[in-house]
Each structure stands twice: as C-alpha cells, then as structure tokens.
Amino acid sequence: MKMNALRCKTVDGVMKELAVYLAVYNLVRLAILKAAREQRVSPWRVSFVDAMRWLLARMLGLPGVGRLLVNPDRAGRSQLRVIRRRLKQYDLLKKPRREAEAEMARKQGEKA
C-alpha cells in the first residue's frame, strides 16, 4: 500500500493519513474475509492485491470480478526477506538469489 513513507509534514496531517491507511486496510481485509467465506478457503490464501484492485473497481463504479484470486497453498515454502533496493529494514541482496538462499538454508541447518 506504499505506506513506508508518510507524505504529510504536520502532526494533524500524519494522523489523518494514518487514519485513511487504517480504514483502507480494514476495508481490504473485510473484502478478503467475505471472499474467503464465499469461496470456502482460508483468508490468508486470498490475494491482498487482488482485493485492493477489486475495491478500487467498485469505487469507480465498475463491476469488478466475481471471485477474488486464491493463492495456491505452498506448504514448506520460504523466501528470502531481502530486496535489491533498500527501502527500510531488509538487507540488500548482494549476491545471486540462489547463492543467498543456499546460505540461508545452511545457516538454518546449523541452528537446528
């Protein structure tokens, strides 16, 4: 939702911006819950981005899609929490992804 940087410069503006983000986030989560109930899947599997797009289409008066996208269940899958450009908290990806994944798996194996 591009909430990593607030744009307002006053305390009142920041509070309003946070309130709007919170309202939108809760609307998206409500749409996800409704879609999950109708499609009989876990709410964690319904696409957040698809729910945001559906809500935007509804706000614009468009019909949107009948069903929200359900992500496949990928048990045991883990992804690195690094990105190529530093936005905030994650480390930079400084080597090929496969090497970094192998190193992360090796480190997790040593801890166990």
Image (spheres, grey):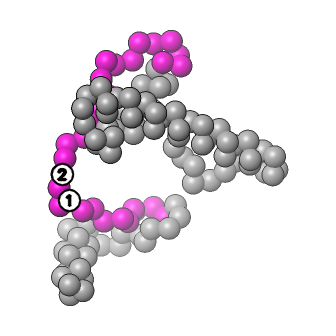
Question: Could you classify mark 1 by the number of other residues whose Cα lies within 10 Å: few (under 14), some (14-19), or many (20 or more)?
Answer: few
**Residue at 19 percent of width and 42 percent of height:** 72
Quarter of the image where the C terminus is located: bottom left
Q: Position of residue 1 (x, y in %)?
A: 51, 43
**Looking at the rendering, which quadrant does residue 37 occupy?**
top left
Q: Is residue 78 visible?
A: yes
Three-letter code for the amino acid on which mark 1 is drawn: Arg
Q: Nearer the viewer, residue 38 or 76?
A: 38
**Whole-Å distance between the Cαs marked 1 and 2?**
6 Å
Residue 54, horizontal then vertical, whole percent = 42, 25
Over which residues does the magenta segment extend? 58-86
Of the numbered discs in the image, which one, if any, rests on residue 77?
1
Which residue corresponds to the image point at 73% horizontal and 42% vertical from the top-left?
Answer: 16
Report the side of 71 relative to 23 (left or right): left
Q: Is 84 above or below relative to 70?
A: below
Amino acid at dot 2 = Arg
Which residue in the protein does label 2 denote?
74
